[in-house]
Amino acid sequence: MTIICVTGLLAELVDGIYSTFEILSAFIRRPIVTARFLKMIDEKNPVSRYNIGKQGMSVECAVCLSKLEKGKKIRNLKCNHTFHKVCVNIWLQQDSVVTCPICRSAVLQEEIMVKL
């Protein structure tokens, strides 16, 4: 009976270690967000102020789902999707592959990501 309990505990311990290893390895593969990294995003995807288009249609930020307001800082990614600057910066810092929240196209070229 004792052997069965110890074997069960050992199996749970190994399973817990394996789960922890998976989480840590995913975290390690994630790009490190540095000031240099954010500067590259700024250079490739500059910030501007939102101005309502010719049709007068308002646009929503796909990250926070709020409408973009005239004069607020926005970031237009190279895929032509537009977001609040703050919202997309938070997204890019959390996303492990640094992609657009809508179409998943790369925000920075792969060779840049390898250098980071």
Image: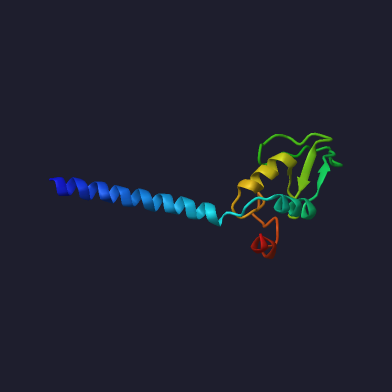
Q: Position of residue 65 (x, y in %)?
A: 67, 36
Q: Is residue 59 above or below residue 100?
A: above
Q: Position of residue 28 (x, y in %)?
A: 53, 55
Q: Position of residue 29 (x, y in %)?
A: 55, 57
Image point 70% across, 34% down: which residue? 66
Q: Is residue 55 above or below residue 97?
A: above
| Residue found at the very far right of the displayed protein | 54
Any part of residue 80 in sight: no
> Is 112 positioned to the left or the right of 54 in the image?
left
Q: Quadrant of the N terminus?
A: top left
Instruction: Give the total number of marks visible in the rendering.
Output: 0
| Residue found at the very far bottom of the displayed protein | 111
The quadrant in which residue 109 appears is bottom right
> Is 69 positioned to the left or the right of 113 in the image?
right
Image point 37% across, 51% down: which residue? 17
Choose between 53 and 74: the one closer to the eye: 74
Q: Position of residue 44 (x, y in %)?
A: 78, 55
> Is 42 positioned to the left or the right of 16 in the image?
right
Q: Quadrant of the C terminus?
A: bottom right
Any part of residue 8 in sight: yes
Image point 32% across, 52% down: which residue? 14
Q: What colour scheme has been applied to the protein in the rendered image?
A: rainbow
Image point 25% across, 46% down: which residue? 9
